[in-house]
Amino acid sequence: MTAAVFFGCAFVAFGPALALYIFTIATEPLRIIFLIIGAFFWLVSLLLSSFIWFMAATLTDNKGEPRQRDLLIFGVLISVLIQEMFRFAYYKLLKKSSEGLKSINPGEKAPSMRLLAYVSGLGFGIMSGVFSFVNTLSDSLGPGTVGIHGDPPQFFLNSAFMTLVIILLHMFWGIVFFDGCEKKKWYTLLVVLLTHLLVSALTFISPYSGLNLVLAYIILVLTGIWAFFVSGGSCRSLKLCLLCQDKDSLLFNQRSR
Amino acid sequence: MATDGGVYVDDLGSRSLLRLVSFCVLLAGLCEGNSVEKKIYIPLNKTAPCVRLLNATHQIGCQSSVSGDTGVIHVVQKEEDLQWVLTDGPNPPYVVLLEGTLFTRNLMQKLKGRTSRIAGLAVSLAKPSPASGFSPSVQCPNDGFGVYSNSYGPEFAHCREIAWNSLGDGLAYEDFSFPIFLLEDENETNVIKQCYRDHNLSQNGSAPAFPLCAMQLFSHMHAVISTVTCMRRSFIQSSFSINPEIVCDPLSDYNVWSMLKPVNTSETLEPDDKVVVAATREGDWGLPRISIFKVYLPCLVCRAQLDSRSFFWNVAPGAESAVASFVTQLAAAEALQKAPDVTTLPRNVMFVFFQGETFDYIGSSRMVYDMENGKFPVQLENIDSFVELGQVALRNSLELWMHTDPMSQKNETVQNQVEELLTILEKSGADVPTVVLRRLSRSQPLPPSSLQRFLRARNISGVVLADHSAVFHNHYYQSIYDTAENINVTYPEGQSPEEDLNFVTDTAKALAGVATVLGRALYQLAGGTNFSHTIQADPQTVTRLLYGFLVRANNSWFQSILRPDLRSYLGDGPLQHYIAVSSPTNTTYVVQYALANLTGKVIDLTREQCQDPSKVPTENKDLYEYAWVQGPLNSNETDRLPRCVRSTARLARALSPAFELKQWGSTEYSTWTESRWKDIRARIFLIASKELEFITLMVGFGVLVFSLVVTYCINAKADVLFIAPREPGSVSY
């Protein structure tokens, strides 16, 4: 019966990512490729940060509890920096490749940088979500549940929702970050880096108070709104959309090719 | 183009999936015992499982399912508490945490067969030991494999005369379909009880609220039904498979034996060389563990049992049933070796310590088999007389009873020899004030003893010395409570281990008296006359041996007599005397080296010469065994002074002849095998209520469906929502 917890948590953490993949990514082969390359870039960044963490751990070589915690905080900071560096590297790569894609396929239209931002952000998010949650998920299969040392039993559900936040945030960060690069607004890069650091730091707060989850979701909503506007949304378009007036829109006619 | 693209994508997709999977596997492997697991489970490290043993017709012991049996913990402190487990409790199945005093056959019968409500059993040690006694062995140990049968001495067969182990309830010979574990550590027991009190106690009989504290026990056994079946399965596999899956192994180990005067092991003795055998058993069984130690004197044969068992695997303290007797025999061997004229005695003396006697006489039946087939230097015909030490530590008012066999004494020659043997024993005991030797009625049968296996093969004169005249004095025969306390080996508080090691207990003094009697009797049986009174067993030796075997194996004296590579065999607790399947066991080695050091000589050889003495012209490997031992610490206690010990202490295989002959259904020889297993462990944790699990699943489904719908809508109206910038070169979505 603990399979119920397993599937419940898996759907919470990866359900939205799955939905996005099915409806927006899987429809075109190129997007799948870019998604996977994005995931790969995230993996490489993790590899690099784990090297650094490992070296630091070996050098300090202290098994003390407080030192371990310091090391962990250091590792998270380094890891966030490296992840954002790789996001930038991926942007540079896409920039180059989109030129190349155009020259190979002059007939086809290359995907917009805005779309690529979304796809690569989702790639980053899925991979980091998998890595942060897969172990917990395998333990949720049971037969036991968290709590014998006094921890609250909602641990698995909390972790699942936290993973969901991370995945979606990576997606939004991707969009904002690439846009900042395109428009040469370098302060956005700094904002992305800082929010990323903030969310990572939130995980150090005891996961049982729920405080970190609430703060993370506030950041998620704010980043989401920002990403919405950056990617061409507006209050007007939202209104049009919600009122189902899209048929009246000129844009619809534009699209029907 | 589209097809090409599809193939390309599929390929890439599957590759990335593969990569993902391998990463996850790698990650899972690296993170075993990760912090989430630590939050969920508390492993129980100090436990002893009950494992499955098989003989020609039956399986005994316990097993769990392959993935372990999980149940809600319920602490049973009195019999009425079982009501909740068996009928009232709303959350079956339960794992019962049973107080040691309640672990009896009667109660277990109630639990047996209730697998729908009982997932397993954890038994805590009773402290102090149950006052009424506890023996999971049967009332008639080794029935059917001794000398008496329906055709030979039917009035004595099946213990008709005396049920030797009258307290035995046969619990250890039952088959249980759920796992049973012994909790050896009191702290762990308290952790479990605390978890039970925190989570599983309900107010006035209502159902307790989730989460509940549960326990999972893993002890899946590979073998089933009987030795015949499991050996056949293993045999078929091993005959054609490169990597056979063996399901059971015969119980086997080594007997330890030595000669007073060295004999050439590459030849057999002449028929007129006479040997006195002194024997005892090496092992004993607690709950699932079994071993026996027997000692024999050859030509005069003296024997003791080396092993014991209990209900639980590898918990076989066997203080009274094995240790006391083989320690006594070791002390006697030492005392006898010191007599000045041992080399000129007309007869030789062989000391034998039999292993596996608890399991239908594995050690002695094998030695008899080897003697009959000329695979042992001593032949059955060489045995002049046989002296066996049974259980000797619990004597009432100094009495030591001499048990003899009524059937062989129907032959007048044998009767005269036995009479002579008893007279010699009585004479040797006359000068020892702490021992009074007593005769028994000539019509009383022998207690379970290795001598029975020798009598089965040949009528020899033999005697079994024991502290009991009829039923055993040992109230904890082959149980986990047969410990140092059972034979009153206790030490004053506040002493260091080193002081304890050399503290001569009253038990040690009493056993030294028995050893003195035995030593003198063997001296006279071997034909010695002049120095009988100088033979005196050393209480210091006895007390050190008792301390090492029963209290703390890792002591300075045991360290100094062992080979350097065997050092790790000594743990901080007592040695266990279960015969086991991976042999030789710790006990066997320690007994061999104790015997070697007590009876052997330190000779001046280098390490290389000692390990290969064939290159030294004055030494002979056929006559002696050479051992390079660690030696005592030097004067400033930093280094050891290793040395070479030359003795006649050797090992002889103790594997039942039934396996040599591939007669797995034998009724003549022991057929006990131990099942193999992969994983034995226990852990406790909380289990969540079904409601919480269901809520989690529903939330998951909710999130999935919601995100599918929202994504579909947004995707459908993406062109409305996201107005494309008017950039040249990029295409709107």
Image (cartoon, coloured by chain):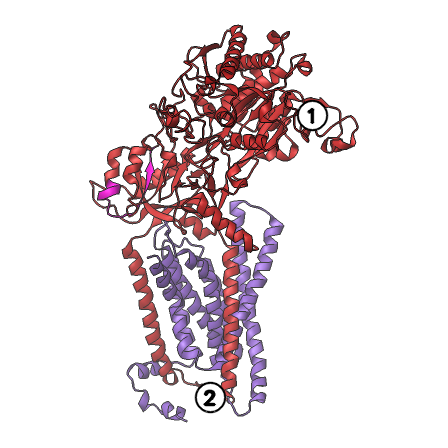
Chain colours: A purple, B red
Considering only vertical position in the picture, is B482 above or below B343? below
Above or below A222: residue B693: above
Q: Does dot 1 land on a helix, a strand or a loop?
A: strand
| Residue B95 sits inside the magenta stretch | yes
Q: Is residue B135 left or right of residue B606?
A: left
Chain for numbered disc 1: B
- Nearest the viewer among A184 and B619 is B619
> Is residue B135 one of those drawn in magenta?
no
- Residue A62: image location, x then y, percent: 58, 46
Q: Residue at x 46, y 69 (%)?
A: A126
Q: Nearer the viewer, residue B241 or B499?
A: B241
Disc number lying in front (1 or 2): 1
**The C terminus of chain A appears in which quarter of the rendering?**
bottom left
For label 1, the crowd category at 10 Å Cα-Cα, with few meaning under 14, some 14 to 19 and many 20 or more, is many
Instruction: Measure the alpha-carbon separation of dots 1 and 2.
Output: 100 Å
Find residue A156 and report its image quarter: bottom left
Element class at badge 2: loop
Q: Which quadrant of the figure has residue B428?
A: top right
Residue A148 in view here: no
Q: Amino acid at mark 1?
A: Arg
- State the count of labels: 2
Residue B646 marker: 1
- Per the rendered image, the range of residues in magenta is B84-99
Q: Residue B726: which numbered mark, if any?
A: 2
- Which residue corresponds to the image point at 47% horizontal and 36% vertical from the top-left? B670
| Residue B674, position as x, y percentages in the image | 47, 41
Q: Chain of mark 2?
A: B
Q: Amino acid at mark 2?
A: Arg
| Residue A225 placement (x, y as % from top left) | 39, 73
The answer to whether B105 appears left or right of B482 in the picture is: left
In the rendered structure, the answer to whether residue A241 lies left or right of residue B478 reads left
